[in-house]
Image (spheres, rainbow, N blue to C red):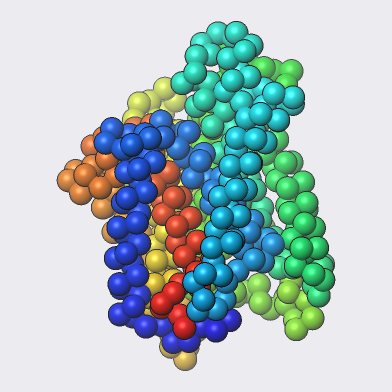
Amino acid sequence: MTTTKNNYLFGLIAFVVMIVVNFALWRLFFAPSKGVFKLFTPMYGLSLAAVYFYSVMLVADVFGWKNETGNVAKGIAPLISSVVIFYVVYYVFFWNILGNFGITYFSPQALIATGGTGLEIWNARENSSLAILFVMTALIWVTMIWNTGFGNSPWDGLQKRVIGFSKFSATAFISTIFYAIFFHPNITALFQPKQIFAGVLPWWDGIAMTASSFYHLGWMFAGLFILMFLNDCMDGFPFNLFRSEEKSGSWIGAVVALVIAVVGGYIFMYIAEAIMSYYWYEPFTGGNYTDDPRFRHVHTAEIAAFFMLALMVVKVFFNNVVEFANKWLTAVIRLVVVSGAGMLLYFFYYSETLGPVYVDRVPGTGNIDATSLCWTIMSMALILVYDKFFNAFPIRK
């Protein structure tokens, strides 16, 4: 990579430009009342953002198509490719192929055609969008663990397209298993009557106090933040201990990444929900708004996503802020900075003034239908495009 010392002035300018672009795209596509297309319904908009985020990951981190030069024009082709992949995956594959010829709940049109109870267009599209969101969550989670632990192994040294197709096939296969276990039971339980022969009843209900897979969304997003921090703010420690000049990863590194993502994710969720219980008291089955266990779980994912967005801002626009000779001191300072920036984003989004104006959201906290995940994932996708496809120009030269 041709990265040189980060120019903080250019970083600040680029960050301001990104805020303007973010605002414009949100108002164009997602803003629920003042937007043009009003795609935030909310699950439809959230699934769209998640599919596009994965499309960028697929192009840049799976197939390795990145622009590591100062030539902005070289980023146009991978950008267009990510948009095409997004459209094909969402509307062609899920809505028109898999939904029509395989699994009905992936297509709102196929759901309506069944004539089932309560299957009108809005409800059908929300249900199919929720399923697509869960598939993307599994794909993103497995792909990040693979990239962290395995890297390009066991295909190191082969052509990029061979590595890309091999890595995609492996991660897609594993993701299908994770989706079937952690998310599919939730979707089959949405319908009346519950589709008990197509999917088991949600087995985590007694633990999570809800049949919703938002429970898994919480610890998975939390685990993703921890992996991102180790990769981007601690130079890949401890996973770099299992790499060599010949191999970009190993089985040991992959197992370590999986354990950290799961255990770390649960610890993060436990701490986050303990803090929520301190302020809002214990949740209970049947509770509304902040008392709803579903909200506590999805709110954990929202908090983790704020931290991930803050981490990307700090890394891409401000070169991780500091770097000392002592790597542990560096890690602690960066954690403080990222956590502080993440909480600033949290308070910005949930403020009673700035948040409703900027993201056109309903004031208040605790409404699951007002989830911040759509905005944060869209924002992360934009930064990922800027970083991977345009090499953070002009910050890097």
Residue 352 versus residue 124 in the image, above or below:
below
- In the image shown, does 384 or 239 lie closer to the viewer? 384
Q: Quadrant of residue 254?
A: bottom right
Image position, residue 183 (x, y; %): 62, 35
Q: Is residue 301 left or right of residue 276?
A: right
Q: Quadrant of residue 337?
A: bottom left
Q: Quadrant of residue 338?
A: bottom left
Image point 47% across, 33% down: which residue?
43
Image position, residue 209 (x, y; %): 50, 30
Image position, residue 298 (x, y; %): 45, 40
Residue 99 versus residue 351 in the image, above or below:
above
Image point 38% across, 35% down: which residue?
37
- In the image shown, does 69 or 77 lie closer to the viewer? 77
Image position, residue 269 (x, y; %): 48, 49
Q: Is residue 39 left or right of residue 150?
A: left
Image point 82% across, 67% down: which residue?
154
Q: Is residue 145 visible?
A: no
Q: Is residue 22 visible?
A: yes
Residue 314 versus residue 1 in the image, above or below:
above
- In the image shown, does 9 or 294 lie closer to the viewer? 9
Quadrant showing the N terminus: bottom right
Image point 71% across, 68% down: which residue?
151
The tally of labels here is: 0
